[in-house]
């Protein structure tokens, strides 16, 4: 996408690093520095491209760009009219004990391609702000992220207008507390000119990336932003060596990018490593300490640093994970850009710890948590798997059952696994942290499966691949798991409940329970109530599987159901959940009935195959999007009553 040659890009970076006078002290932390055989990473190419673009922009005479002095004057006028620059560190720390949210507007990215080109920046930011975002991050890089400074100004104006209207409606014009969110310019900033440009466009803060910036220049940029503009920058680190540079340069708001932007690998533990390192150094940062100060506790001290987690998050579990180590702000972008209702998606993040605690309460009563798992099954092609992942599916099902029209070979399965792993930015199977498949400490099967369901929810934030088997020898299932790299299995035959113990395969297993229909559709369970059927199922449930999936079968089929295209009596699922057991429902689901299923039954999970196909084994991408989007929207609407 770059219009420059490799030599031009390399020379731009060489000059930025200080040319012949660059030193290991200022550049030693930079990826590939002093390596004559180093090939630029995508991050370095984008940075170099940005440097050259600005060189050309500033040397243009038709029309000439504004000088940095003119930009500073424009910034002064803008903020005089539309309100002063907001202090980022205070904005974050004022939200304690709730997690501050930086909601990102990002049209595209180098790793994920186009995400949501059609969205209006101001409109989306209004939704983010209305749902509780404290910071709106705006990608302004044009070539790879397809953003602009116009997007940033649109976001600033829209949120300022919304905040003013809300204040007027609440008759709190004299309230001196901050109402609008801080606006972050996220770009590849290498010069004071870009900082002044951001301020003139309405930004409150800017992102500075340690990984691409010499330490002496980083300090100059921080000082310029803070002393000349009045901005507190967000300083991004990944490796611990970069943390040294950020601290030495005087960073007060430190963001940890869990993604290595040179390699695009994701490690959600990176933020925790930085938190541990800050603790070792005696630097105060814990977000809870801010709440202590607000509550008037003895000897309150505002933390020296605000710590932020900047990538790879999409759920309340992620937010809570970082809350536990003292993080004050999470930045979330892609999942909100893809969400059919960003407001409800933000609500589901449980930024307030009390909301998260309530959502995780295991009282031993009915399951009322709503739909958390969406499985798209019968995938035979990597492209269809990626479409399901992009739509928001939690589980991708590949079928090995001999009788299925959607049966895949091991080679097909491996291709699908590799595609799903690449999408989830992982190189190995995901470990689901669960209790082993035996009852311990007098735990009942239901309470054990409730705990396991929570573990699967957390693990499937990055889509998992499930291999579906029917009456296959368990040793063959295990061999297939190992050869194909499956994350989970699903037993869909007459193998028995105990066969679903993870010890048999090395991965967790879903256990299918067939709900029998009569051969002439008169209902195989017509003389039994839903509660009676549910009670019978519950008596046979063990702690072996990770979860229970209900599917339709035809009376007389002794080999296991599935693939009927028919629904069963959903009140059976309701009864089971009223007895405390979360279940996945399958059988006859489609975009046409998913809203009814999720809205009325509120199952823990839903599973679709034929209902989103163009032909057996070939997905209709539009139907996949409609199904997943419909399930998520219905789940969000249903949750409003709880």
Image (spheres, helix red, strand yellow):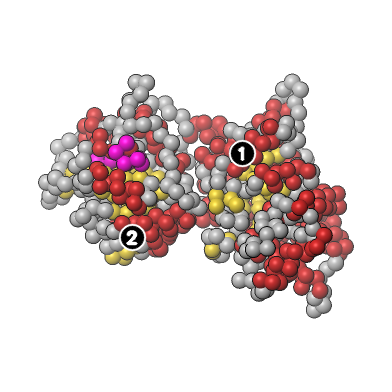
Q: Which mark is residue 273?
A: 1
Marks counted in the figure total 2
Residue 398 versus residue 528 in the image, above or below: below
Residue 574, above or below 56:
above
| x then y, percent, for residue 229 | 83, 53
Element type at mark 1: helix
Which dot marks residue 134?
A: none
Q: Quadrant of residue 412?
A: bottom left
Q: Dividing the picture into quarters, in which one does residue 495 lie? A: top left
Side of 615 where 527 appears, left or right: left
- Disc 1: CA contacts within 10 A as few (<14), some (14-19) or many (>=20): some
Q: Is residue 500 magenta?
A: no
N-term-proximal mark, 1 vs 2:
1
Question: Spatial distance from mark 1 to mark 2, Cα to Cα?
Answer: 37 Å
Observer-nearest of 196 and 125: 196
Q: In the image, residue 277 lies at what x, y percent?
A: 67, 36
Name the one closer to the observer, 362 or 176.
362
Residue under label 2, please give it: 412
The extreme bottom residue here reads 62
Please tell me which residue is depicted at 79% across the width and 46% down the height of the picture: 249
Name the side, left or right, on which 267 lies relative to 247.
Answer: left
Q: Is residue 229 visible?
A: no
Q: Position of residue 245 (x, y in %)?
A: 74, 46
Residue pictured at 52% horizontal, 34% vertical: 356
What residue is at 78 percent from the left and 43 percent from the top? 248
Between 423 and 551, the residue placed more toward the observer is: 423
Q: Secondary structure at mark 2?
A: helix
Query: Which region is colored magenta?
Result: 503-513
**Side of 261 relative to 520 (left or right):** right
């Amino acid at each position: 996408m770059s219009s420059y040659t490799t030599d031009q890009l390399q020379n731009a970076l060489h000059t930025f690093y200080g040319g012949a006078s660059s030193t290991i002290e200022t550049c030693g932390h930079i990826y590939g520095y002093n390596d004559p055989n180093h090939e630029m990473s995508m991050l370095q190419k984008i940075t170099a491209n940005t440097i050259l673009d600005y060189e050309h922009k500033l040397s243009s005479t038709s029309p000439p760009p504004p000088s940095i002095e003119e930009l500073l004057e424009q910034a002064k006028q803008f903020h005089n009219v539309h309100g002063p620059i907001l202090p980022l560190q205070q904005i974050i720390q004022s939200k304690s004990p709730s997690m501050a949210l930086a909601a990102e507007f990002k049209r595209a990215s180098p790793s994920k391609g186009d995400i949501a080109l059609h969205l209006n920046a101001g409109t989306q930011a209004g939704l983010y702000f209305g749902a509780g975002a404290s910071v709106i991050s705006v990608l302004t890089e044009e070539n790879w992220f397809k953003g602009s400074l116009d997007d940033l100004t649109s976001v600033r104006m829209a949120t300022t207008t919304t905040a003013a209207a809300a204040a007027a409606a609440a008759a709190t014009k004299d309230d001196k507390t901050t109402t609008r969110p801080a606006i972050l310019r996220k770009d590849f900033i290498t010069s004071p000119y870009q900082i002044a440009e951001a301020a003139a466009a309405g930004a409150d803060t800017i992102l500075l990336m340690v990984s691409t910036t010499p330490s002496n220049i980083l300090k100059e940029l921080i000082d310029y932003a803070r002393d000349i503009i009045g901005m507190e920058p967000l300083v991004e680190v990944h490796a611990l060596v970069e943390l040294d540079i950020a601290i030495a340069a005087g960073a007060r708001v430190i963001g940890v990018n869990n993604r290595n932007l040179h390699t695009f690998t994701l490690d959600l533990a990176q933020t925790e490593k930085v938190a541990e390192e800050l603790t070792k150094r005696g630097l105060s940062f814990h977000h809870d300490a801010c709440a202590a100060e607000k509550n008037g506790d003895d000897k309150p001290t505002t933390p020296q640093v605000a710590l932020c987690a900047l990538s790879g998050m999409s759920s309340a579990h992620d937010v809570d994970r970082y809350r536990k180590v003292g993080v004050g702000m999470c930045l979330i972008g892609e999942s909100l850009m893809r969400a059919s209702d960003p407001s409800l998606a933000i609500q589901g993040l449980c930024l307030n710890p009390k909301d998260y605690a309530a959502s995780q309460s295991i009282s031993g009563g009915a399951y009322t948590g709503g739909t958390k798992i969406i499985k798209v099954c019968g995938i035979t092609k990597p492209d269809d798997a990626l479409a399901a992942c992009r739509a928001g599916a939690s589980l991708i099902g590949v079928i090995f059952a001999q009788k299925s029209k959607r049966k895949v070979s091991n080679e097909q399965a491996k291709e699908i696994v590799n595609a799903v792993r690449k999408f989830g930015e992982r190189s190995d199977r995901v470990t689901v942290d669960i209790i082993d498949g035996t009852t311990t400490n007098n735990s009942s099967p239901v309470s054990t499966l409730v705990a396991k369901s929570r573990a699967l929810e957390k693990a499937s934030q990055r889509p998992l691949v499930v291999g579906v088997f029917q009456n296959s020898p368990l040793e063959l299932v295990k061999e297939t798991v190992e050869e194909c790299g499956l994350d989970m299995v699903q037993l869909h035959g007459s193998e028995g409940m105990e066969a679903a113990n993870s010890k048999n395969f090395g991965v967790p297993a879903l256990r299918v329970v067939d709900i029998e229909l009569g051969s002439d559709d008169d209902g195989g369970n017509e003389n039994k109530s839903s509660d009676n059927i549910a009670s019978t199922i519950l008596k046979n449930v063990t702690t072996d599987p990770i979860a229970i999936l209900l599917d339709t079968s035809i009376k007389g089929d002794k080999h296991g159901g599935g693939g009927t295209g028919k629904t069963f009596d959903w009140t059976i699922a309701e009864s089971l959940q009223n007895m405390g057991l979360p279940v996945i429902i399958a059988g006859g689901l489609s975009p046409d009935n998913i809203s009814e299923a999720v809205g009325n039954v509120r199952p823990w999970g839903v599973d679709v195959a034929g209902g989103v196909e163009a032909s057996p084994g070939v997905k209709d991408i539009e139907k996949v999007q409609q199904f997943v989007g419909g399930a998520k929207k219905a789940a969000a609407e249903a949750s409003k009553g709880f």
